[in-house]
Structure formats: C-alpha cells, structure tokens
Image (cartoon, helix red, strand yellow):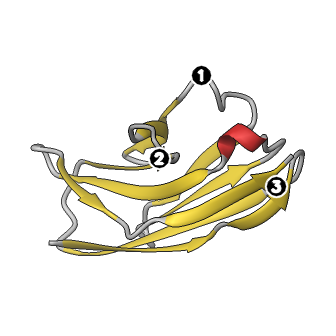
Amino acid sequence: QVQLVESGGGLVQAGGSLRLSCAASGNILIPNAMGWYRQAPGKQRELVATIFNGASTNYADSVKGRFTISRDIAKNTAELQMTSLKAEDTAVYYCNFRNGIGMRDYWGQGTQVTVSP
C-alpha cells in the first residue's frame, strides 16, 4: 500500500501561480511514477503532468509551458508548480502514484484549485 498526502491549492486570480505538493509513503517500489490529474465539474479526470523515476516528464498540451512537475526521489515527494493560471485550470487536482513494474495506481484525496477570471 502507498499513502499519499497532498497540500497546496486554493483560490488565485487568473495569471497567478500556485504550487501543489504530494508526499508518498508506504511500500514504495522501483520503478515508479508520480503525477497530477484533475477533474473539473461535469468532466472526466484528465492527465496534467507525470514524472517517471524522477526524470522523464509528460504534460498535457493545455499546461505545457505553464506547469512544471518535479520530484524528490529521496523524500518520495512531487511538486507541481503552476503559473499563468487560467479560469479553465479550475478543478480538483489529484496526486497519482504508480508503483512498481505493474504500475499499480494510488490516488490522493484531491485538492481544489480555483482560478477566478
């Protein structure tokens, strides 16, 4: 089992910045990946950004150039730095951890990000 604790999020005006953090603990295997997904009201959960083994990153087209994901392998933490936020970035953001060769999924409890126009 892997436990995830998220922090950050909140309310910000358009053009502002926020940082999300996620800390993983438990039976952490190698390889693994951490990432963030988001779900807006009435929409499906979608990928925001992922980082594999602390090095290889992948971003949704809608956030490229504005969001940066980083990872501290030793601490098993990940951060999502979000800049130039837009109203359409408003959603509940979920931390995701994919554990081991089988890439079993674990999810955080979600944190609300609200961007006012």
Residue drawn at 69 percent across, 61 percent down: 19
Mark whose residue sits in front, 2 or 3: 2
Query: Could you say which is closer to the camera, residue 105 or residue 86?
Result: 86
Image quadrant occupied by the N terminus = bottom left
State the image coordinates of residue 21 (x, y, percent, origin top left).
57, 67
Q: Quadrant of residue 96?
A: bottom left
Q: Is residue 53 above or below residue 17?
A: above
> Which label is found at residue 17?
3
Horizontally, residue 108 falls left or right of residue 54, namely left
Say which element carries label 1.
loop
Q: Is disc 1 surrounded by few (<14), some (14 to 19) or many (20+) residues within 10 Å?
A: few
State the image coordinates of residue 84 (x, y, percent, origin top left).
84, 41
Q: Amino acid at mark 3?
A: Ser
State the image coordinates of residue 108 (x, y, percent, origin top left).
37, 67
Mark 3 or mark 1, which has the lower sequence index?
3
Horizontally, residue 23 falls left or right of residue 18, namely left
According to the image, label 1 marks what residue? Answer: 61
Outermost front residue: 42
Residue drawn at 69 percent across, 53 percent down: 81
> Which label is found at residue 39?
2
Say which element carries label 3.
loop
Q: Is disc 3 surrounded by few (<14), some (14 to 19) or many (20+) residues within 10 Å?
A: some
